[in-house]
Image: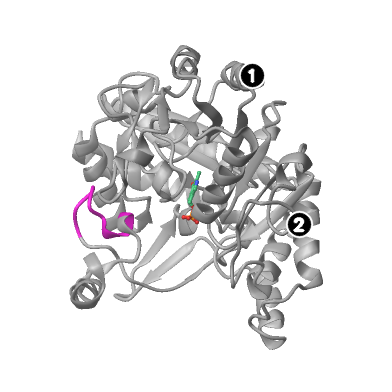
Amino acid sequence: MELRFSVNDFNEAKQVIVGGVNSPVRAFGSVGGTPIFIQSAKGYELFDVDNNTYIDFVQSWGPLIFGHCDGDIEDAVLQAVKNGLSFGAPTERETTLAKLIISFYEGIDKVRLVSSGTEAVMSALRLARAFSKKDGILKFDGCYHGHSDSLLVSAGSGCATFGTPSSLGVPEDLSKHTYVARYNDIDSVEQCFKSGEIGCVIIEPIAGNMGLVPADLEFLKDLRKICDKYNAVLIFDEVMSGFRAGKNGIQAYSEVIPDLFTFGKVIGGGMPMAAFGGREDIMRLLSPCGGVYQAGTLSGNPVAVSAGIAALCKIEQNPHIYAEMETLAQRLVQGLQKTANANDIALQTCVRGSMFGFFFNDGVVKNFDDAKKSDLKMFAKFHQEMLHRGVYFACSQFETGFICTPMNAEVIDRVLGCADEVFRAIK
Ligand SMILES: *Cc1c(COP(=O)(O)O)cnc(C)c1O
């Protein structure tokens, strides 16, 4: 497989764009090699500038549940474009999208639309701090919530303590208010609450940013209890899992209702669109009703909102797609598992609706410490070899894979054929 033009493009990009990319994971840093430069895409396939074709399990990191260039979303966008790109004034469409989000989920009275997941989480956090009147927040090691300062914090010397900045430029004065607990470990949560400072807990209820690691359902119930006990605001960050793991994300699996939710990815149908929402008594603290400031020139952008409405309407009309995508995801991971077993390669797999994950790991993965024990060299080889056979997986062991509706069993079996060759080559 030739990557001549991609290599050229990458070198040229590096002259003017830091690292040649506009989001770091795209640089293929953890797997080596050159990122492919995309020419176009259709359905489940990507076409690069060297005329190679790939089966795409990244789907723009989640948003494209109906694949690339879905006709309905495309039509909605084209129609919207003709009526104006942005007004900075309200439109009826924003109400339609808000109603759709609220209709899918239990526990959302009000929402506000923003333009990225980072922005949604950052705003939800500010709101939670205002409501609880406490500065301390608790996050989980291995969960990603965008790149706002308070959340670029890692576990430091160990879990269940306040964190240390995981990026230069984040003041320690700020990171000391972010406590980091271990995923699926309620004792570590209890320990953090002893500080008396915590007014908010944020979690990916189906973690997709350390590989795919779902929270135990009992763990979510215990989290709810502990938040109630300490009057802390519980935030479910469903930027990835919302409208992806199921029509209503984690609520397809669990009855636990958080106080606030954050969404992104799927609700924009591929356009920059995100939202946060939840309980009326918390949401009403938001400006212009309350004293928590939050704003955005392009918030509720009419083109992005139109794409989001088209995606959510299509989901509403086709709720069966989740079971179908789950069947394909199971076919994929079971096939990978079988081939891995045959070649004595340790593999752990997981599926939640249209999301799937696999770790080159001997043991069951329940948290980030477990995930980090994976064989990253093996993953890098697997990634490279699959890429060369035209299969595009996310370029890190700590990411999730996505099925889209245009995929079918024949596509999955083609991928499994490649994986069979690759496992034999890399074992
Ligand atoms: C992608 C993601 C974010 C950040 O969203 P952006 O749109 O990239 O800013 C936040 N939380 C979770 C769980 C995500 O997967």
Tell me which corner region of the image, top left, top right, bottom left or bottom right, holds residue 373. top left
Q: Which residue is mark 2?
A: 98
Magenta-drawn stretch contains 28: yes
- Whether residue 410 is visible here, answered yes or no, is yes
Badge 2 density bin: few <14, some 14–19, many ≥20, Cα 10 Å:
many
| Secondary structure of residue under mark 2 | helix
Q: Residue at x 65, y 37 (%)?
A: 131
Badge 1 density bin: few <14, some 14–19, many ≥20, Cα 10 Å:
some
Q: Position of residue 417 (x, y in %)?
A: 38, 45
Q: Position of residue 354 (x, y in %)?
A: 57, 43
Q: Position of residue 170 (x, y in %)?
A: 31, 47
Nearer to us in this view, 174 or 413: 174
Would you say the magenta stretch is mainly helix, strand or loop? loop
Residue 226 as seen in the image, left or right of residue 290: left
Q: Is mark 2 within 8 Å of ligand 1?
A: no
Region rendered in magenta: 25-33
From mark 1 to mark 2, how far is it between C-alphas?
Answer: 27 Å
Tell me which corner region of the image, top left, top right, bottom left or bottom right, holds residue 328. top right
Residue 379 as seen in the image, left or right of residue 74: left
Of marks 1 and 2, which one's residue comes earlier in the chain? Answer: 2
Image quadrant holding the C terminus, namely top left
**Tag of residue 221:** 1
Q: Position of residue 425 (x, y in %)?
A: 20, 41
What amino acid is found at the position of numbered circle 1 in the picture? Lys
